[in-house]
Image: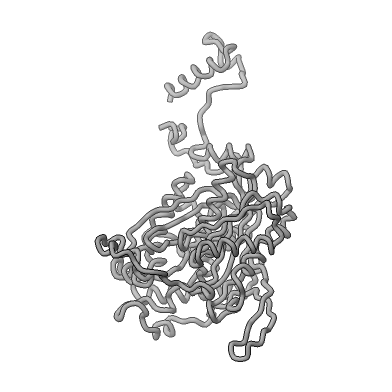
Amino acid sequence: MEKAINRQQILLQHLNPSLSSSSSQQNHNPALSASFCLAGDSAAYQRTNLFGDDVVIVAAYRTALCKSKRGGFKDTYPDDLLAPVLRALIEKTNLHPSEVGDIVVGTVLAPGSQRASECRMAAFYAGFPETVPVRTVNRQCSSGLQAVADVAAAIKAGFYDIGIGAGLESMTTNPMAWEGSVNPRVKEMEQAQNCLLPMGVTSENVAHRFGVTRQEQDQAAVDSHRKAAAATASGKFKDEIIPVNTKIVDPKTGDEKPVTISVDDGIRPNASVSDLAKLKPVFKKDGCTTAGNSSQVSDGAGAVLLMKRSVAMQKGLPILGVFRTFAAVGVDPAIMGVGPAVAIPAAVKAAGLELDDIDLFEINEAFASQFVYCRKKLELDPSKINVNGGAMAIGHPLGATGARCVATLLHEMKRRGKDCRFGVISMCIGTGMGAAAVFERGDSTDELCNARKIESNNLLSKDSR
């Protein structure tokens, strides 16, 4: 400790020549002085908060999520799903659309060039001028979260001060399918072969390898529906869902009926373990993955408005959340569902936090098997996870899920106030990956955002060790 303080004093003498070795520290009070670092790993938080150069979220919205081919958006074009949430960001913040530096949209199933054009069209429908660029990003099920992370990184890099990270998927329009032939070389490498496994087979692999029972999976599904139904009944989702005016076409007569969709239509309030136990496995004859304990195939969109803190403060915009860290990791493709169990610790560590510091988790329920495994592996408190239900009840429109989770998490953190400071979003990713991001409640930052109680005399920051 003394050596460290001495080094600081020597450096300060070079910076402040008036401070001589004969001068008394007690009698001389220079602008620069040696001191202990009491902030621990939060020193960076202190700087970004005070200097206004961290990245904040000022608005996050989504559409309702609807059942593919059978739900409220079965006759809605993908661009008509994205446009309303983009428009809402501008209208509800009074931001001039020309100030947005970029719009990044996570999307998975549609052909790349076609979906890129649809997203550009959606931006025009939403009122953005031609000067605002648009691009898409595809990291499978984490695409919406990746879009948010890409925008946050661009703002941090100084490319622009304001950006939108969004997500879009119409699984009605673009069902999951492989186009064209498969390279025969894939037979030469097991890992490459496993990239082609149906996701349900990877779910069975997780359940078998890690001993996740059918009972545990069905119970997790019931819990998801129960919590989502309660959240819907209490009006919790109204803060995040943007109603969409669209149409429903009668398949028999072709008649069109105008409708406004504002409620997730896949939630089953009366789901029970006994009813789910009657469902047959889908991917393996003696397996345990069923339609009831898997995520729903859905249509929907979401959008998140991010900007530099100083810009938000200048505009007088309320800060919904703070983007802290993001991590993407690779795992065995055969058990791709374990991704969150690896990605969450990586993202939390990068934020200078520990798992116990996290107040809420949004972990995508791709399958109950992998969701239960990740919860048990990380020893997470179930009362902190998916408190308003997850993908088994609400739905999983692949490219939109990340943006949907941001909206759900940040609005719930706002409701909980001081009792909820840090939140994590995570999901597994097809072909064997995981992604996670850490957020902080918007009004909770202070000069020592992650200061820990000092348990010893070692007051140096971990960065100095």
| Residue extending farthest left | 188
**Between 151 and 232, which is closer to the camera in this rendering?**
151
**Between 68 and 445, which is closer to the camera in this rendering?**
68
The image quadrant that residue 166 belongs to is bottom right
Q: Which residue is found at the position 46% from the left and 32% from the top?
A: 460
Q: Which residue is found at the position 67% from the left and 66% from the top?
A: 84
- Left or right: 63 with respect to 44? right
Question: Does residue 227 appear anywhere in the picture?
Answer: no
Query: In this rendering, is residue 420 above or below 455?
Result: below
- Left or right: 429 with respect to 165? left
Q: Residue 330: horizontal and vertical position, in percent?
A: 37, 55
**Between 86 and 390, which is closer to the camera in this rendering?**
86
Instruction: Count the labels in the image.
Output: 0
Quadrant of the rendering where the N terminus is positioned: top left
Query: In this rendering, is residue 155 above or below 342?
Result: above
Q: Residue 410: horizontal and vertical position, in percent?
A: 59, 58
Query: In this rendering, is residue 4 above or below 229?
Result: above
Q: Residue 280: horizontal and vertical position, in percent?
A: 37, 83
The image quadrant that residue 182 belongs to is bottom left
Q: Residue 387: horizontal and vertical position, in percent?
A: 53, 66
| Residue extending farthest top | 22
Quadrant of the rendering where the C terminus is positioned: top left
Q: Which residue is found at the position 44% from the left and 68% from the top?
A: 366
The image quadrant that residue 246 belongs to is bottom right
**Between 178 and 382, which is closer to the camera in this rendering?**
178
| Residue extending farthest bottom | 252
